[in-house]
């Protein structure tokens, strides 16, 4: 089972804090991989919030092909944090080349373009790059978005962190999603490694999404740029979150109404029953049928956790409002390791109707139940 | 045989018949029940003459010859009276002295059963024992779920949507603007498909209706039953049970008058309206209710004289094209109930199914598409239609589902698949396979007759006399002397029994796949088949 750990903090922290938590939760995952999503970046990136950052892994050949492509499209590199390991990779990890996060200046021609269009173009460029590298494997890109870095690799999380020197000064973030373990149900592939990312939204999941194929077919038929790939059954959770918030304009508290709608009994005296039952019908194809726990981060930096009713061991959310730090963990031991000084009685384990949300201010855990009236959103 | 008995090209011997009667002189009590129950008069009382030679002991006395007669059973060899293997004779025989035996090498009758230039018509199914659906396996057994689902204890939601479902974007827009929303019903995914009031006997119909009502009201299973073409008894139209009924209206408008007249007095809306353009067993043909079954009641409901054959046209002659027909009929039926009732067409699976579907996708009032595959059954059809026409359901359904996926409308137009589901008794497995291939629900007809009323029809051309009103079980007869054999209460009981067991079996399939809160429509990754070509065609896994 994948182990998941997410941190959201007022001040930037090192991703090592999340990796250490994964390590504590090691019993129960096979140490086959690690994936990291960082946003709300600190350090040198603080000044570069406007510039889309390309994160990926490149061979020398790939690096030059990538920069040709970027230049051709009018993108100028502004700042980069690249890392080329010079030591032997840990056992089982292939030697790949340069791990890079490069911030680019958007071409002048894009000025005045609608925000939607800019987003779509960025996604399209990421997909183009990914396609360019698909055959030879010289280019692998995980995200191309402002204030976002993604790192993925195969191997034991702690060993990889050591190998890639993830404790570097330049890797500091306010919002971190970390996942330990490679793909379970399908082939091992870096693109199959959580977290997944699209247009500022990132999620990771554990459990098996049994409804993967019909959901994938449905998402792919929606005509949204970026709904593709799907090397992992969990990638659809990210896209559903994107679809629900960006395309349908719903609030994140409604995400759960899409993936795990209430049954008739539970809905019976809900004040928004009419809307919810319509939504359930229209989004029936997106019901996940788990058991899954989803942890995700939104463009504004708020973080959430939700799980379906089949998930018997829920994740846990807890933290310290004074320090302004909250953790989302699939196991309580991970949370204990990452944020030991917190009021444990305030830990919240969201059950099958709950979504736990921590806003960007990191002050409290908002507990939304599906039984609550919907937040105004229509 | 007497030497002067004429032997013509169509003279058959017992050996030429596919079903041969074995009668045992020693156990027969001569009660005469078998000959009186035989629906096709295949057997008659026979008087046999026998010579008995008695050689005495010793050398002097001469042997004597005695002639005597005895009574027995004679099987007729006239093709018009060929035994149909129903085994009713055995069922009524107190001593098991008689039974039909199938002779597979006796094919002569096939060349003879078109007397008077009339091709054979019959009821039943295609009489082909192959079933692709039976070969499909469910291969994705989830062992990673924590814990694995328990089919017996877990909460399952085995329901499906019938009606046009808006896309999420349109739904939200509609809600925001308070717009018109197409009606949608949440029903059980196993529907009793259209079998008309003329085709079935009143007892059978009543039994089915009672069973359906019980399932709805006592078992909390929203099971629906389709009326079949040719109208509906007026009392049902005006009852509260109408909500459990899908009214079928043939493209030829049979029985429509009765329904129209009842509309102002309807207490409930029907569940849906199915417009029948075609059916799997006789694609390109309309219904065929033969004169034997058109009694006074049927004639009244259909608005025709009694005792005439009722071949309904495949589609009404005022309709120029399928586009026009579908659009017009859906529009007018929706209008009749104030756009509160889902309306969808039923077609026979064929290479033009996709064309019809494409049409529906663009029609905002279309509530679904029912597709009936070649294995579908019927009350009467020409043998040639039943055996040789139409398209298998699995690949046709798959094509349609994939077309919907491309159009992004797979949630929006539910596909209802039928035709040969459970033909070997594997109802739940067949239904689950079709659901995973893309059907939102499935419909059954013949299975219901077999399971709920003991229909004797098999895939080996057994019985199949549903068309001539002599159904030995009283299922498809309009003759009270015959149909009173069938107890409606018992039929209702069996309907409930097989629905409940279907439900359990369906959970047993879905639970290991990890599905419980939504039907696995289109979950084709869970399917495998050991036939490479079938796997490629259906786009499922090839497993050996
Ligand atoms: S099996 Fe049926 S048709 Fe044949 S003789 Fe017996 S009763 Fe008649
Ligand atoms: S038992 Fe009745 S319904 Fe069944 S095949 Fe025979 S005639 Fe038809």
Image (cartoon, grey):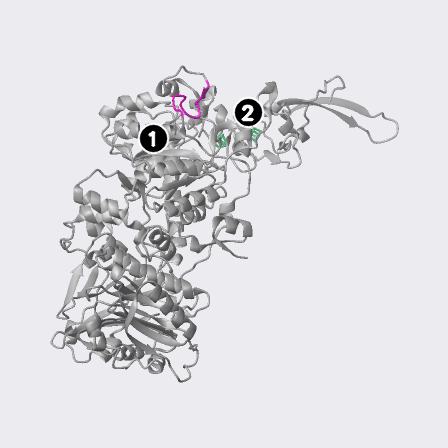
In the picture, residue A147 is in which quadrant? bottom left
Q: In this rendered view, identify the residue nearer to me: A264 or A84.
A: A84
Magenta-drawn segment: B309-320
Query: On the picture, is B5 further left or further right than A354?
Result: right
In the picture, residue B247 is in which quadrant? top left
Chain of the residue that carries numbered disc 2 in the rendered image: B
Is the magenta region chiefly helix, strand or loop? loop
Q: In this rendered view, identify the residue nearer to me: B289 or A166.
A: A166
- Mark 1 / mark 2, whichever is N-terminal: 2
Residue A3: assigned label: none
Considering only vertical position in the picture, is B47 above or below A342? above
Chain of the residue that carries numbered disc 1 in the rendered image: B
- The quarter of the image holding the N terminus of chain A is bottom left
Report whether residue B418 is seen: yes
Report if residue B316 lies within the magenta region. Answer: yes
Label 2: how many Cα within 10 Å (few below 14, some 14–19, many 20+): many
Report the residue that reaches farthest toward the bottom: A87
Secondary structure under tag 2 reads loop
Q: Quick check: is the Cβ at mark 2 less than 8 Å away from ligand 1?
A: yes
Report if residue B141 lies within the magenta region. Answer: no
Q: Are marks 1 and 2 in contact (CB under 8 Å)?
A: no
Considering only vertical position in the picture, is B78 above or below B97? above
Q: Quick check: is the Cβ at mark 1 less than 8 Å away from ligand 2?
A: no
Secondary structure under tag 1 reads helix
Residue B261 in the image: x percent, y percent? Answer: 27, 21
Residue A29 in the image: x percent, y percent? Answer: 36, 74
Residue B327: assigned label: 1
Report the residue that reaches farthest toward the left: A322
Residue B398 in the image: x percent, y percent? Answer: 44, 45
Report whether residue B94 is seen: no
Task: Find disc 2 in the rendering and name its residue.
Answer: B40
Residue B154 in the image: x percent, y percent? Answer: 32, 57
């Amino acid at each position: 089972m994948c182990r998941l750990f997410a941190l959201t903090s007022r001040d930037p922290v090192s991703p090592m804090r999340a990796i250490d938590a994964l390590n504590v939760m090691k019993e129960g995952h096979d140490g086959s991989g690690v994936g990291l999503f960082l946003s709300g970046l600190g350090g040198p990136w603080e000044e570069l919030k406007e510039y889309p950052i390309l994160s990926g892994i490149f061979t020398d050949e790939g690096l030059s092909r990538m920069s040709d492509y970027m230049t051709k499209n009018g993108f100028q590199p502004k700042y980069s944090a690249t890392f080329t390991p010079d030591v032997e990779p840990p056992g089982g990890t292939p030697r790949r080349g340069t791990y890079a996060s490069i911030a680019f200046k958007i071409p002048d021609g894009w000025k005045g373009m609608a925000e939607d269009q800019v987003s779509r173009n960025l996604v399209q460029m990421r997909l183009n790059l990914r396609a360019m590298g698909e055959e030879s494997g010289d280019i692998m890109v995980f995200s191309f978005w402002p204030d976002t870095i993604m790192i993925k690799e195969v191997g034991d999380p702690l060993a990889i962190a050591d190998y890639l020197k993830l404790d570097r000064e330049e890797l500091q973030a306010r919002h971190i999603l970390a996942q330990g373990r490679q793909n379970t149900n399908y082939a091992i592939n870096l693109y199959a490694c959580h977290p997944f990312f699209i247009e500022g939204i990132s999620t990771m999941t554990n459990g098996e999404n049994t409804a993967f194929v019909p959901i994938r077919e449905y998402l792919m038929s929606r005509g949204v740029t970026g709904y593709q790939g799907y090397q992992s059954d969990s990638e659809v959770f990210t896209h559903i979150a994107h679809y629900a918030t960006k395309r349908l304009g719903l609030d994140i508290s409604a995400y759960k109404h899409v993936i795990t709608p209430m049954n008739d009994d539970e809905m019976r005296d809900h004040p928004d029953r009419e809307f919810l039952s319509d939504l359930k019908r229209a989004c029936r194809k997106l019901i996940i049928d788990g058991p899954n726990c989803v942890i995700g981060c939104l463009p504004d930096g708020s973080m959430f956790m939700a799980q379906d009713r089949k998930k018997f061991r829920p994740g846990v959310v807890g933290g310290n409002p004074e320090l302004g730090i909250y953790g989302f963990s699939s196991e309580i031991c991970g949370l204990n390791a990452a944020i030991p000084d917190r009021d444990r009685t305030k830990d919240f384990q969201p059950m099958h109707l709950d979504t736990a949300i921590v806003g960007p201010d990191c002050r409290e855990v908002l507990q939304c139940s599906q039984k609550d009236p919907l937040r105004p959103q229509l | 045989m007497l030497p002067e008995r004429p032997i013509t090209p169509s003279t058959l011997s017992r050996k030429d018949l596919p079903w041969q009667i074995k009668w045992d002189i020693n156990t027969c009590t001569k009660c005469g029940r078998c000959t009186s129950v035989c629906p096709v008069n295949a057997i008659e009382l026979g008087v046999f003459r026998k010579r008995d030679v008695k050689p005495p002991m010793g050398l002097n006395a001469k042997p004597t010859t005695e002639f005597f007669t005895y009574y027995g059973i004679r099987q007729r060899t006239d093709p018009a009276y060929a035994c149909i293997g129903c085994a009713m004779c055995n069922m009524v025989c107190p001593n098991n002295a008689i039974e039909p035996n199938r002779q597979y090498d006796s094919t002569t009758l096939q060349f003879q059963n078109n007397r008077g230039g009339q091709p054979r018509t019959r009821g039943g199914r295609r009489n082909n024992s192959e079933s692709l659906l039976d070969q499909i396996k469910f291969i994705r057994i989830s062992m990673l779920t924590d814990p694995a689902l328990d089919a017996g204890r877990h909460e399952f939601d085995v329901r499906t949507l019938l009606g046009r479902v808006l896309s999420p974007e349109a739904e939200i827009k509609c809600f925001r603007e308070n717009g018109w929303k197409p009606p949608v019903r949440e029903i059980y995914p196993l529907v009793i498909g259209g079998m008309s009031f003329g085709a079935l006997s009143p007892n059978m119909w009543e039994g089915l209706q009672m069973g359906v009502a019980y399932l709805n009201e006592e078992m909390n299973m929203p099971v629906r039953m389709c009326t079949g073409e040719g109208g509906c008894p007026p009392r049902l139209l005006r009852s509260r049970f109408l909500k459990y009924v899908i009214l079928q209206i043939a493209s030829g408008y049979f029985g429509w008058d009765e329904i129209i007249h009842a509309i102002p007095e309807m207490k409930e809306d029907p569940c849906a309206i199915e417009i029948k353009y075609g059916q799997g067993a006789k694609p390109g043909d309309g219904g065929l209710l033969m004169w034997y079954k058109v009694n006074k009641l049927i004639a009244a409901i259909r608005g025709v004289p009694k005792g005439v054959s009722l071949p309904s046209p495949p589609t009404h002659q005022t309709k120029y094209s399928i586009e026009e027909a579908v659009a017009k009929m859906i529009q007018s039926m929706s209008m009749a109930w104030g756009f509160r009732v889902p309306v969808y067409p039923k077609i026979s699976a064929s290479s033009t199914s996709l064309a019809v579907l494409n049409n529906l996708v663009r029609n905002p009032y279309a509530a679904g598409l029912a597709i009936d595959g070649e294995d579908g059954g019927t009350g009467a059809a020409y043998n040639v239609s039943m055996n040789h026409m139409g398209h298998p359901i699995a690949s046709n359904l798959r094509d349609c589902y994939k077309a919907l996926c491309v159009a992004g409308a797979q949630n929006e137009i539910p596909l209802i698949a039928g035709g040969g589901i459970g033909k070997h008794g594997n109802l739940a497995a067949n239904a689950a396979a079709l659901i995973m291939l893309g059907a939102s629900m499935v419909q059954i007809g013949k299975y219901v007759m077999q399971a709920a009323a003991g229909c004797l029809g098999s895939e080996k051309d057994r019985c199949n006399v549903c068309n001539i009103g002599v159904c030995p079980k009283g299922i498809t007869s309009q003759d009270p002397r015959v149909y009173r054999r069938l107890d409606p209460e018992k039929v209702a009981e069996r309907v409930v029994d097989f629905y409940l067991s279907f439900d359990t079996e369906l959970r047993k399939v879905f639970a290991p796949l990890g599905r419980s809160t939504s039907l696995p429509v289109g979950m084709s990754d869970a399917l495998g088949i050991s036939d490479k070509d079938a796997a490629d065609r259906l786009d499922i896994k090839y497993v050996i």
